[in-house]
Amino acid sequence: MDVNADFDHRVHVHSGRIDWVPSPMPGVDRRMLDRVGDEVARATSIVRYAEGSAFPEHTHGGGEEFIVLEGTFQDEQGDYPAGTYVRNPPTTHHIPRSDDGCTIFVKLWQFDAADRNQFSLDLNTVPLVDLEHGRARAELHRDAHETVAIEQWQPHGTYDVGDAGGAEILVLDGLLQMDATRLARHDWLRLPKGDLISLKAGPEGARFWIKTGHLDHLRVPESN
């Protein structure tokens, strides 16, 4: 299965406008943002767990990172409430579930194969550093493969975004304006390598997750 699988072109998705697709497990549905492969895939998705739903134990051959957007995600390591960012690198394993239901943004098979840095962060409390007037940033993870951060823009702030190795954004709160396109809460944007665009925050500002550099290192499962 290929979804937005041409990484040489810019793509944006208004996530609330696309259908939920059932996963193999009852009560777990997905909105596919990009995907290369079938059930084991290089994938970026928004995943919804119904109350009491779960996946069986599995190992992350290519790593997994996710942000809890709503509700509380759980596994044997503990509870991850809304606003938690988690990195589970290759070789880690768990039994994911949600007792009360949750929604997460998740990326699979996109880690450096040698990455073993497992951690979680509360995005609501990470300290932001001012970059320039009206723009602040908190770096979450950096290695030779990618940089992951949170940015907060003040209302109507306008800045350039892009990277030689590609860039990807998930809007967490507020609004970003891209030419005639508005990106609202949980909308997603992917820029190909070398693409540079100007974005403007809406009247209430914008807060978003951003990853850069990673499209220089495309990984897919060997079975695909």
Image (spheres, helix red, strand yellow):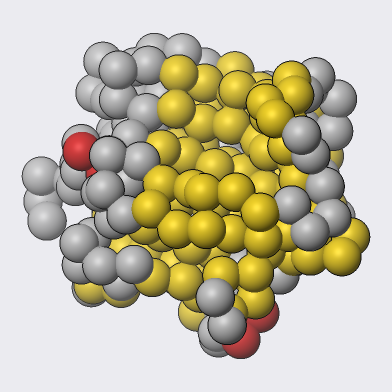
Q: Is residue 69 visible?
A: no
The front one of 110 and 151 is: 151
Q: Please name the residue shown 66% across and 54% down the image.
A: 158
Image check: 176 left or right of 1? Answer: right
Q: Is residue 163 visible?
A: yes
Quarter of the view holding residue 122: top right
The front one of 18 and 200 is: 200
Quarter of the view holding residue 188: bottom right
Residue lying at the far right of the rendered structure? 204
Image check: 10 left or right of 127? Answer: left
Q: Please name the residue shown 56% across and 70% down the image.
A: 178
Q: Quadrant of the N terminus?
A: bottom left
Q: Quadrant of the C terminus?
A: bottom left
Residue 123 position within the rendered picture, expressed as x and y whole percent measured from the top left: 76, 32
Does residue 140 lie above or below 214 as drawn?
Answer: above
Residue 38 position within the rendered picture, expressed as x and y whole percent measured from the top left: 25, 65
Q: Please name the residue shown 34% across and 67% down the image.
A: 10
Q: Please name the residue shown 73% across and 59% down the image.
A: 201
The front one of 16 and 173 is: 173
Does residue 53 lie above or below 63 as drawn?
Answer: below
Does residue 159 lie above or below 57 as drawn?
Answer: below
The front one of 130 and 81 is: 130
Residue 66 position within the rendered picture, expressed as x and y whole percent measured from the top left: 57, 42
